[in-house]
Image: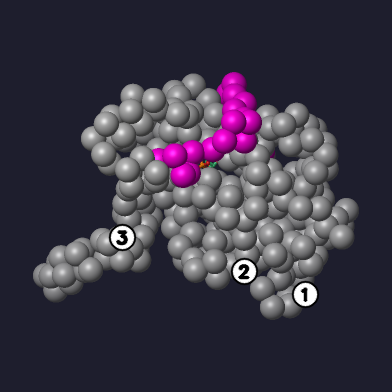
């Protein structure tokens, strides 16, 4: 029997340098796709997968994230006074309940692995999910829920993977693939940001993980890797052979919203998928495309 995934860690301590100047004073994770900040989608995805405790690893200047998940009494009172019942219900509907959210601070942006390690005392000794909010997945069944189902069958470490163009391997953790069965591919090796000519495959890890808590022991002794950062990929690689370890090819389209073009694509795709917005936007897009 695999343990239920009750906790999710959201590393949001990064500097977001690819999205300057927008991210100088505003957290990257607060950038809106259509009408919701990225972090809101991440929280919804975790909730849809059965997660009960949401752990944010923040840093200086990320206060807007905490405000987003906090009550806003003046706003609630104003909506109520103006009879905007639907808006008020929507607002209260997604707000986390008392005790569901924890924040821990990453004192220095030392990398994704370091950010995850900051959550060790809040995760404890149980398998947990990691969601990178700037990786947004448009899917019928949310990506993490797909992973939780697959994890119930295999346990161990499970990472979301997709095939990327070979010239992009340097942006990702890349798998040495073993036996493949359906959506699952056994992980035989894992390397962070390999050059295209030496990448073991093009099967690359995106921002969704289910990890055994033993990862923390490896992160504690992990030396700095690619980019001088403590890499989650390097610590995960040490667990190959220790626990079952699979890549999971999810159903859906992933957008890198930490990148300006990826962010714009996500806005278009998510807007088109919305019945209240898609039909209004589509004619403009068609007209614009015809002029290209
Ligand atoms: P990125 O590689 O996108 O880095 O991090 P970044 O700093 O956020 O953005 P750029 O590349 O400078 O534009 C992937 C995820 O890991 C988190 C980020 O917040 C993001 O969710 N992260 C990264 C941390 O929490 N702490 C870190 O030290 C580094």
Q: Quadrant of residue 155?
A: bottom right
Quadrant of image for the N terminus: bottom right
Residue 228 locus on image (x, y percent) = 61, 34
Nearer mark to the viewer, of 2 and 3: 3
Residue 41 makes an appearance in the image:
yes
* Position above or below: 59 against 290: above
- As helix, strand or loop, the secondary structure at mark 1 comes to strand
- As helix, strand or loop, the secondary structure at mark 2 comes to strand
Quadrant of image for the C terminus: bottom left
- Label 1 environment density (alpha carbons within 10 Å; few <14, some 14–19, many ≥20): few
- The structure residue drawn at horizontal position 77% and vertical position 74%, both measured from the top left corner, is 179
- Label 2 environment density (alpha carbons within 10 Å; few <14, some 14–19, many ≥20): many
Which labelled disc corresponds to residue 271? Answer: 3
Residue 206 locus on image (x, y percent) = 57, 56
**Residue 121 is a magenta residue:** no
- The structure residue drawn at horizontal position 33% and vertical position 28%, both measured from the top left corner, is 77
Residue 133 locus on image (x, y percent) = 50, 46
- The structure residue drawn at horizontal position 65% and vertical position 48%, both measured from the top left corner, is 51
Q: Is mark 1 within 8 Å of ligand 1?
A: no
Colour scheme:
one colour
Which labelled disc corresponds to residue 249? Answer: 2
Q: Which residues are magenta?
A: 91-113
Location of mark 1 (residue): 179
Sooner in the amino-acid sequence: mark 2 or mark 3? 2
Q: Quadrant of residue 148?
A: bottom right
- Distance of mark 2 from mark 1, alpha carbons? 13 Å
Residue 282 locus on image (x, y percent) = 21, 68
């Amino acid at each position: 029997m695999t343990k239920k995934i009750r906790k999710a860690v959201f590393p949001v301590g990064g500097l977001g340098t690819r999205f300057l100047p927008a991210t100088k004073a505003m957290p990257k994770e607060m950038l809106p796709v259509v009408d919701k900040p990225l972090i809101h989608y991440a929280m919804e995805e975790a909730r849809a997968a059965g997660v009960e405790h949401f752990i944010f690893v923040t840093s200086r200047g990320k206060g807007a994230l905490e405000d987003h998940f906090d009550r806003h009494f003046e706003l609630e009172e104003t909506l109520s006074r103006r009879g905007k019942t639907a808006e008020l219900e929507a607002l209260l509907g997604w707000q986390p309940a008392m005790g569901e959210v924890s924040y821990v601070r990453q004192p220095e942006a030392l990398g994704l692995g370091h950010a995850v390690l900051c959550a060790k005392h809040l995760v404890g000794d149980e398998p947990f999910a990691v969601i990178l909010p700037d990786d947004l997945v448009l899917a019928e069944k949310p990506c993490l829920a797909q992973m939780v189902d697959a994890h119930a069958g295999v346990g161990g470490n499970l990472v979301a993977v997709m095939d990327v163009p070979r010239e992009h391997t340097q942006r990702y953790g890349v798998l040495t693939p073993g036996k493949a069965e359906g959506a699952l591919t056994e992980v035989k090796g894992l390397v962070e940001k390999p050059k295209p000519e030496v990448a073991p495959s093009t099967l690359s890890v995106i921002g969704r993980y289910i990890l055994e808590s033993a990862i923390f022991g490896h992160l504690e002794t992990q030396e700095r890797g690619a980019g001088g950062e403590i890499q989650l990929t390097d610590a995960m690689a040490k667990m190959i052979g220790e626990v079952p370890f699979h890549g999971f090819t999810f159903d859906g389209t992933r957008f890198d919203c930490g990148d300006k073009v990826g962010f714009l694509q996500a806005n278009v795709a998510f807007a088109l998928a919305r019945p209240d917005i898609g039909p209004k936007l589509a004619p403009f897009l068609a007209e614009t495309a015809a002029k290209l």
